[in-house]
Amino acid sequence: MAVECVGLDIGSSAVKAVVLKLGRKGTRLVSFGIEPLPPQSIVDGMIMDQAAVVDAIVRLKSALGIKIKATATAISGHSVIVKKIQLSIMTADELAERIPVEVEQHFPFKRDEVDIDYQIVKPSGAGSASSGPGRPGPKGTMDVILVAAKKEIIADYMQVVRDAKLQPAVLDVAAFTIQNAFEAGYGEAATQGNIGLFHVGHALTHINIISNGVSVFARDVTVGGAAFTEELQRRLHVDFEAAEGFKLALGDPEAQGGDGAGSGVGTSSGSASGVPPAVAEILNEAAEGAAAKLQRSLDFFLASAPEFALSKIYLSGGSAHVTGLVRAMAARSKIPVEILDPFRRTLIDTRRLDGQFVKHHAAEAAVAYGLALRSPGDAAR
């Protein structure tokens, strides 16, 4: 059995951790928890307050009783760029020599400022691959995913993991981890058709469009729950804490948080009582704006693949349950939208874990869950 990793999602507003046990009888959830971060600790994927992030990881590790050291975490934001390119079929050595040339052509970063990784996503034994989603490409070509990430960003994330007395083992791209979680939770359905995965966090949304189980488009956009909170602050003339409380109170009516063995630190979304009547209208309007921005990113992709048609969108992330967002996304895209549950095929021991906490925060766990599926030294999933 592969060695497990702590799946550690260092997000804009909170740190999430998932530990799984992968065995012949299925995947078992060992622990899951959430620890909030002070505002502005993470900005556009960049760690601004390392001490605050380390403290949050240490508190979460202690609350969950995590003993595993190997840790998988993810990076995101504008300092990370993902691009799919098409190349002639070549050997592994030839591809390694070719990659620096492709990097110079496709990325705006200076080569000495970034670390590069790549993976063939459409290997072709017969000598043909997909030039784009849903249509065959020229014979003798292959699709390659290129990732470039600023070295300073990578170093910062590795350092906070080490300072929390954990051992960095895997560094992934947040948008790809959602696909891992989706595949684990939905089985064969995750490898059929064209699916949009949107992980709506506090400040960023990670987008991953997959076609028959293969990522064809991935990017981060500056859309998230913070915009809803800021709109409430502006229009109701209240502080951040009050606005955030109103937003959470009118979110998923079941998502009330809860503490228990293995649940970590969660913040209750509270009761809708005492919420001003105007809050629902403001959130619905903000949801329309967020959906419009997300649709523009989708349209950007579809412009390069006019025959591509999504069959479904799955929303995850801490802001997926914000009032009006599912409805607004479905209305804009004109396709079904559903909240993603990475735990739907996971064994959960409710004698050890708070089942309500796991259920209510499942969408928020998607990145951490996808990371927890990784093992030290494995190839990208």
Image: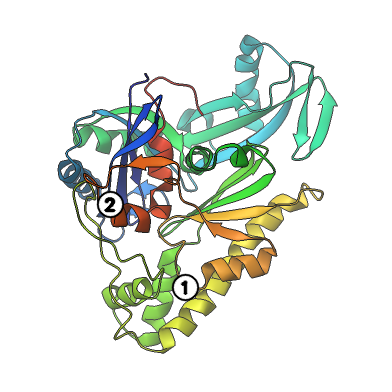
Instruction: Name the residue tied to disc 1.
Output: 323
Q: For this rendering, which residue is in front, 81 or 143?
A: 143
Amino acid type assigned to the residue bearing label 1 in the image: Thr
Residue located at (45% from left, 65% from top): 321
In the rendered image, residue 104, in percent from the top left (x then y), is placed at 62, 30
Residue 104 or residue 374, whichever sits in front: 374
Answer left or right for 341 relative to 275: right
Observer-nearest residue: 196 or 303? Answer: 196
Outermost residue toward the bottom in this view? 277
Count up the numbered dots.
Answer: 2
Q: Which colour scheme is used?
A: rainbow
Task: Tell me the crowding category of disc 1: few under 14, some 14 to 19, or many 20 or more residues within 10 angstroms, Cα based.
Answer: many
* For residue 266, side relative to residue 43 (left or right): left
Say what amino acid the circle numbered 2 marks. Ile
The picture places residue 333, in percent across and down from the top left corner, at: 68, 63
Q: Mark 2 and mark 1 in contact (Cβ < 8 Å)?
A: no
Residue drawn at the location 41% of the way across and 66% of the way down: 226
Horizontal and vertical percent position of residue 268: 26, 66
Q: Which of 31 and 366 is in front in this view?
A: 31
From this view, report whether residue 264 is shown above or below residue 143. Answer: below
Examine the rendering and report whether any part of residue 246 can be seen: yes
Left-right relation of 97 to 157: right
* Image quarter hosting the N terminus: top left
Mark 1 falls on what kind of element?
Answer: loop
Residue 324 location, x and y as percent?
52, 73
The residue drawn where x is 30% and y is 57% is 356
Spatial separation of the CA atoms under disc 1 and disc 2:
21 Å
Residue 48 circle label? none
The residue identified by callout 2 is 34
Q: In this view, does 235 lie above or below 141?
A: below
Q: Residue at x 40, y 58 (%)?
A: 318
